[in-house]
Image (tube, rainbow, N blue to C red):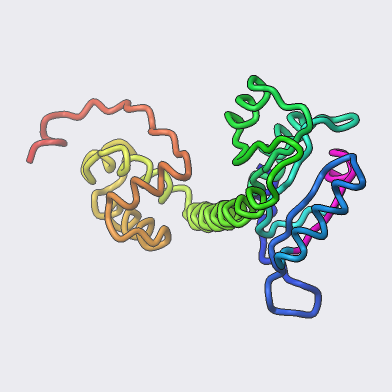
């Protein structure tokens, strides 16, 4: 995902303090944009408004906590179409849909695709204001998870080729002597590479290393092992 690959600490220019979360409003009705802008700013959130989905997509990418208040019916790219794009390009932004003519199938489609709220105009502003903090919290969690994932993948990238080979076989459940047989190296060498992999991955146990491998989506190696009895005995 593009937003995951670009994830970095972003702050206000000239400041070490991260910028506040932003609520993005996409609605082609100027009066709606202005009223929601005033309402949400009064609650202390930063706000950016856009008349079309294209305008929103053309904004400079900013990977900070936020959410999107999105009109369903937009000129050009629809709200549902934008939702699909956001899932790929801005996966950390939860969506609160607003619409003047919603129907059950559309609502179900939007919610199944991950929208956290679907409000029909005119809607209770209190419902919207209660939904925004929940959306911001989800956004923050998504960014934190992405940062952790990137850190984990950076650790894996620091492994040598041999360390990766040993790690793959170890997390697949092979004993050190089986790994040694598979790779054609000594058991002592396997232990050394295994220890290095554990250290670089910052894994406190084999179970933790297995979990990390799964998060890195490491495919289990094809088992080609045909050990003689002496290789696996004891």
Which quadrant of the figure has residue 143?
bottom right
Residue 139, magenta (yes or no): no
Task: Please give the name of the residue rendered at 27% of the width and 43% of the height, measured from the top-left corner.
Answer: 180
Q: Is residue 228 visible?
A: yes
Q: Quadrant of the N terminus?
A: top right
Residue 52, magenta (yes or no): yes
Magenta region, residue range? 46-58
Q: Is residue 73 left or right of residue 105?
A: right
Task: Please give the name of the residue rendered at 89% of the width and 29% of the height, measured from the top-left corner.
Answer: 76
- Residue 139 in picture, x, y percent from top left: 60, 53
Q: Nearer the viewer, residue 10 or 83?
A: 83
Q: Nearer the viewer, residue 142 or 177?
A: 142
Q: Is residue 229 left or right of residue 163?
A: left
Q: Nearer the viewer, residue 98 or 210?
A: 98
- Residue 23 in picture, x, y percent from top left: 73, 55
Q: Nearer the viewer, residue 130 or 3?
A: 130
- Residue 58 in picture, x, y percent from top left: 87, 46
Q: How many marks?
A: 0
- Residue 150 in picture, x, y percent from top left: 56, 54
Give the farthest residue toward the left. Answer: 234
Q: Is residue 35 above or below residue 53?
A: below
Q: Quadrant of the C terminus?
A: top left
Q: Is residue 157 visible?
A: no
Q: Is residue 109 left or right of residue 208?
A: right
Q: Is residue 61 above or below residue 81?
A: below
Task: Please give the name of the residue rendered at 77% of the width and 58% of the height, measured from the top-left corner.
Answer: 39
Task: Please give the name of the residue rendered at 79% of the width and 80% of the height, measured from the top-left corner.
Answer: 14
């Amino acid at each position: 995902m593009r937003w995951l690959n670009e994830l970095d600490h972003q702050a206000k220019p000239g400041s070490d303090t991260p910028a506040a979360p932003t609520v993005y409003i996409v609605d082609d009705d100027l009066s709606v944009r202005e009223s929601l802008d005033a309402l949400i700013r009064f609650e202390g959130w930063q706000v950016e408004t856009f008349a079309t989905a294209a305008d929103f997509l053309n904004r400079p990418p900013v990977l900070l906590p936020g959410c999107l208040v999105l009109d369903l019916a937009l000129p050009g790219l629809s709200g549902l179409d934008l939702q699909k794009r956001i899932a790929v390009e801005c996966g950390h932004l939860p969506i609160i849909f607003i619409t003047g003519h919603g129907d059950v199938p559309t609502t179900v489609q939007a919610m199944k695709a991950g929208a956290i709220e679907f409000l029909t105009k005119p809607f209770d502003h209190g419902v919207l204001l209660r939904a925004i903090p929940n959306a911001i919290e989800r956004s923050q969690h998504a960014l934190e998870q992405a940062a952790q994932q990137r850190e984990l993948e950076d650790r894996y990238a620091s492994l040598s080729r041999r360390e990766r080979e040993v790690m793959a076989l170890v997390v697949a459940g092979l004993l050190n002597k089986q790994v040694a047989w598979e790779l054609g190296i000594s058991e002592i060498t396997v232990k050394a590479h295994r220890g290095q992999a554990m250290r670089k991955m910052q894994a406190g146990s084999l179970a933790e290393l297995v979990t990390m491998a799964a998060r890195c989506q490491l495919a289990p190696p094809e088992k080609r092992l045909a050990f003689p009895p002496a290789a696996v005995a004891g």
